[in-house]
């Protein structure tokens, strides 16, 4: 009989801990949070329905919690184990969320007073860490629970009412959040900078010089006489030279060509040679945000992908806790790194340091993210998936590098002057690494530029001259790593929330990815405008940072939670959120908020057919409007790429949509070519007439511009079936354009048309030949898989295939099919990415299946014996386990 019950969040973590504990312990997983605020009014208990400021929060700013439907069977299982337990250990994660989960478990499980409750905080999941924690258990930190609850309530007070306002004033389905909305504002402000940017055009004239010994080196033109040559950094966003750079010379194409002719016959010699010591310090250890940024830059991982793999490594015992802002390594870690460096690189390469000064404002007691026991990356790679292996390698190298010597060397600067009354001056720079130091363990990004040996006065010959035109570029958009860095710098949010915030603003209608950059949508522009004009202080960066500080003060007991929430909602010297929302509901004009005159940067308004062009954000997305003409803006078009040419094309297409191609010769009705949700189609009849119009899809690969009135009529005939003859038995044969392609039909017999068969002209003879062929049963022969991954560790050794399906590429393990994300290349997707898509799909399927199972069980309970009902519960438990495993691994 089990004597000790240990509860963790994740089944993976439970599996790892079970390996280290004896048979006297039983480890169960809560699978994340078990209770939360109600998501909708119908879930609120009756006694609280008339006593709420927003759904889930009472008038006294207390939380109303309900047990998650999909956690009832999990709690039931844990309760059964608790009946036989003499001790209860709560081993959820050692942070705010983990502390809150432990508190909720206590509230729901209500263990007997005779069962001692102990809190285990694990910075890493190793045998020694477990033994140490069990030997010295702790108490539940109620201040940390208060801090988590305060954040949850603030998020609800902000999110629910502001989201509701956005639904009414901008578009349905939009969401708001105290950190999310400010992150969107950062994206929009960066895009505004790009929209008002005016590029400058300038030329340069790089040269390749050759020494007397025949060695070559590249150099950049810096001066002509006393005039510095303008470079990209010398121009402002208005396309003009910056005020302090007004003495620079901006080379034109003609001047660059003239200088090339001159330099071709000029004499040059080395005028200056300078050598400076070079030193590059080792990096700091990884905290959460640093790991997300480096994994994005080095591995191309999104923050969510990074945290998924990092959590898996932690739960399997390979790295320390992954949500941390502390740079201070533990003494045992420092000793382990010292031993490792001495054995691999020699004791002389060890240079101990710790980072206490960087950790003065750290919000937690966890170490930075490091290997738990410094297992070699090659060994770990045999036990985890590809993503996890690559991330572990990054963490291992970074941690070891922090305790090694700096990289040292020399920077050499050579200057070359022309023999002329207004001499040209060129400069070349090179770096030589003499002692790699920490680069021995992680040489990525190291680049040496070795210059030839020269002395002052040496003549050099012009080997090559390259005049080149340049245009200044606007400031770059934020990448995911860049946005995290900016949020961290401004104190917006916390490292543990960055991944989910960036995921959310992409899943909502606020941004999309182009290459690695995050591009805000016009919907984001409308939302940010609304927030800036009507909730200005709430979206101020300083306010958001202060809010984080206030919530930290609640965590430390320096601020009262109820008073803080009341002031946030009702106001204290300035308008509270509730007052701003009431005022906004009355005063915000959706037409004004969602209307942007063009061009965005100002100036003469764009015109189309003598009408001013405006951009509007509508219910189904952004569109252009000029008088009565409207045209939808393509989803993939970045705001700063919308120019007058694009505008004209969009509105020309919109104008064609409202103008008929012509009229049907048989009915006299107008015929239109239109674009709908599922692609272009033809329409016969006016949408505003009493008679319902007829519709027909275009054929596959048919361009809308190629459709004439006659073709449109033929398409409409195909929808109803074009008669093309009879069978030998006299049955009528018709050709159809169906959902899955072109086919012929005679009574109940159908056959698909083959490549080369024209549906408009296919003959009776050809149709009879097709009908005479044996009918192909089932689907066509399956295409070979695009990729195959065998022994995928994340799926316990299963094989994954990447296939091309009817609705696009997908990953399958033979049981679960998961569509790949739109930005995933099926030929380049990794086994880990595919596995995580399948696990996520399993989770969604389990949730849907569980609801159905529950419904059936309830129905049968009325008619069947108790024994059968119990069996149903067992099945339900299995479904829950499948779901939770997919979610947390």
Image (cartoon, helix red, strand yellow):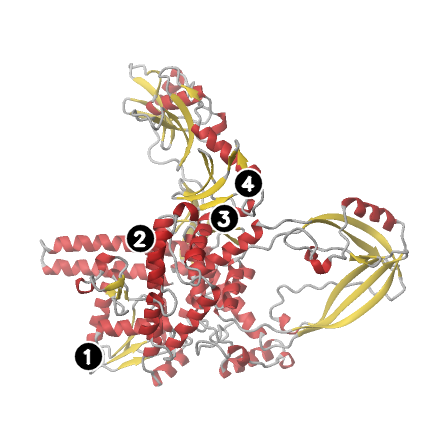
Mark closer to the chain start, 4 or 1? 1
Which mark is first along the chain, 2 or 1?
1
Alpha-carbon span between mark 3 and mark 2: 24 Å
Element on which disc 3 rests: loop
> Which one is in front, 29 or 192?
192
Q: Quadrant of the C terminus?
A: bottom left
Given contact means CB atoms under 8 Å apart, are the residues at marks 3 and 2 in contact?
no
Residue 186 x %, y % = 50, 58
Bin the neighbour count of mark 4 within 10 Å (Cα to Cα): few under 14, some 14-19, many 20 and up. some
Mark 1–mark 2 distance (CA, rounded to whole Å): 37 Å
Q: Nearer the viewer, mark 4 or mark 2?
A: 4
Up the image or down, 774 lies above or below 667; here it is: below
Figure check: 681 above or below 329: above
N-terminal label among 3 and 4 = 4
Which-is-in-front pick, marks 1 and 2?
1
Q: CA distance from mark 4 to mark 2?
A: 51 Å
Neighbor class of circle 2 (other Cα within 10 Å; few <14, some 14-19, many 20+) is some
Q: Which quadrant would residue 698 be assigned to in this image?
A: top left
Element assignment for label 1: loop
Judging by the rendered image, the residue that carries numbered circle 1 is 112
- Residue ID for mark 4: 605
User: Between disc 4 and disc 2, whose residue precedes?
Assistant: 4
Look at discs 3 and 4 and give the one toward the viewer. 4
Label 1, label 3: how many angstroms apart (C-alpha)? 55 Å
- What is the C-alpha distance between the residues marked 4 and 1? 74 Å
**Distance of mark 3 from mark 4, alpha carbons?**
41 Å
Picture coordinates of residue 681, whole percent (x, y): 41, 30
């Amino acid at each position: 009989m089990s004597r000790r019950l240990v509860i963790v969040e994740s089944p993976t973590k439970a599996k790892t801990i079970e390996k280290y504990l004896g048979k006297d312990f039983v480890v169960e997983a809560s699978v994340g949070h078990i209770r939360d605020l109600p998501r909708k009014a119908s879930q609120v208990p009756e006694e609280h329905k008339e006593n709420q400021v927003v759904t889930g929060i009472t008038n006294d700013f207390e939380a109303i919690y309900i047990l998650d439907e999909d956690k009832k069977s999990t709690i039931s299982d844990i309760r059964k184990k608790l009946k036989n337990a003499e001790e209860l250990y709560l081993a959820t994660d050692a942070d705010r969320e983990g502390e809150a989960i432990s508190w909720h478990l206590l509230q729901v499980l209500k263990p007997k007073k005779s069962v001692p409750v102990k809190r285990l905080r694990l910075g890493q999941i190793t045998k020694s860490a477990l033994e140490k924690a069990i030997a010295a258990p702790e108490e539940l930190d109620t201040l940390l629970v208060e801090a988590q609850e305060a954040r949850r309530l603030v998020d609800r007070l902000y999110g629910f009412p502001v989201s509701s306002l956005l639904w009414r004033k901008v578009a349905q389905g939009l969401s708001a959040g105290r950190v999310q909305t400010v992150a969107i504002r950062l994206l929009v402000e960066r895009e505004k900078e790009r929209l008002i940017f005016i590029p400058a055009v300038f030329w340069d004239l790089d040269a390749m010089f050759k020494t007397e010994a025949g060695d070559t080196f590249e150099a950049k033109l810096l001066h002509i006489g006393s005039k510095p040559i303008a470079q990209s950094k010398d121009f402002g966003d208005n396309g003009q030279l910056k005020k302090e750079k007004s003495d620079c010379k901006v080379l034109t194409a003609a001047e660059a060509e003239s200088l090339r002719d001159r330099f071709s016959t000029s004499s040059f010699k080395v005028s200056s040679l300078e050598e400076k010591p070079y030193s590059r310090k080792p990096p700091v250890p990884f905290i959460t945000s640093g790991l997300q940024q480096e994994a994005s830059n080095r591995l191309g991982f999104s923050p969510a992908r990074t945290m998924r793999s990092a959590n898996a490594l932690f739960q399997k015992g390979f790295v320390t806790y992954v949500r941390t802002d502390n740079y201070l390594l533990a003494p045992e870690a420092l000793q382990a790194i010292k031993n490792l460096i001495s054995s691999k690189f020699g004791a002389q390469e060890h240079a101990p340091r710790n980072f206490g000064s960087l950790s003065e404002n750290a919000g937690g007691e966890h170490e930075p993210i490091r290997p738990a026991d410094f297992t070699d990356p090659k060994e770990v790679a045999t036990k985890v998936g590809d993503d996890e292996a690559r991330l572990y390698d990054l963490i291992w190298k970074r941690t070891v590098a922090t305790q090694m010597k700096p990289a040292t060397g020399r920077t050499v600067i050579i200057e070359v002057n022309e023999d002329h009354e207004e001499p040209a001056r060129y400069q070349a720079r090179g770096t030589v690494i003499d002692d790699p130091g920490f680069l021995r363990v992680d040489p990525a990004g190291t680049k040496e530029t070795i210059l030839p040996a020269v002395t002052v006065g040496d003549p050099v010959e012009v080997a090559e001259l390259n005049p080149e035109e340049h245009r200044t570029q606007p400031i770059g958009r934020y990448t995911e790593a860049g946005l995290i860095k900016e949020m961290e710098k401004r104190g917006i949010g916390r490292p543990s929330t960055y991944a989910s915030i960036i995921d959310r603003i992409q899943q909502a209608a606020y941004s999309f990815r182009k290459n690695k950059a995050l591009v805000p949508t016009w919907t984001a522009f409308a939302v940010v405008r609304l927030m800036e004009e009507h909730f200005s202080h709430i979206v101020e960066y300083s306010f958001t940072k202060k809010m984080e500080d206030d919530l930290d003060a609640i965590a430390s007991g320096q601020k009262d939670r109820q008073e803080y929430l009341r002031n946030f909602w009702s106001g204290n010297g300035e308008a509270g959120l509730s007052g701003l929302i009431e005022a906004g509901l009355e005063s915000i004009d959706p037409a004004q908020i969602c209307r942007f005159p063009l061009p965005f940067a100002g100036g003469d308004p764009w015109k189309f057919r003598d009408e001013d062009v405006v951009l509007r954000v509508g219910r189904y997305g952004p569109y252009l409007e000029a008088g009565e003409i409207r045209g939808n803006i393509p989803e993939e078009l970045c705001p700063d790429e919308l120019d007058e040419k694009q505008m004209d094309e969009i509105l020309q297409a919109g104008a064609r949509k409202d103008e008929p191609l012509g009229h049907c010769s048989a009915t006299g009705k107008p015929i239109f070519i239109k674009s709908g949700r599922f692609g272009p189609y033809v329409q016969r009849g006016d949408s505003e007439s009493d008679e319902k119009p007829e519709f027909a899809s275009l054929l596959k690969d048919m361009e809308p511009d190629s459709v004439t009135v006659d073709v449109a009529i033929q398409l409409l005939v195909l929808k109803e079936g074009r008669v093309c003859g009879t069978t030998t038995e006299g049955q009528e044969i018709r050709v159809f354009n169906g959902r899955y392609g072109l086919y012929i039909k005679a009574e109940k017999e159908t056959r698909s048309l083959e490549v080369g068969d024209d549906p408009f002209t296919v003959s009776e003879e050809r149709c009879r030949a097709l009908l005479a062929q044996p009918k192909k049963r089932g689907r066509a022969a399956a295409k070979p898989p695009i990729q195959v991954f065998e022994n995928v560790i994340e799926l316990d050794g299963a094989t994954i295939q990447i296939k091309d399906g009817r609705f696009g590429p997908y990953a399958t393990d033979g049981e679960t099919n998961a569509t790949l994300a739109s930005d995933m290349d099926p030929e380049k997707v990794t086994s880990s990415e595919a596995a995580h898509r399948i696990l996520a799909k399993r989770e969604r399927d389990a949730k849907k299946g569980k609801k159905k199972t529950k419904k059936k069980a309830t129905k049968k309970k009325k008619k069947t014996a108790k024994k059968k009902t119990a069996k149903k519960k067992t099945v339900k438990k299995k479904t829950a386990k499948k779901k939770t495993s997919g979610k947390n691994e």
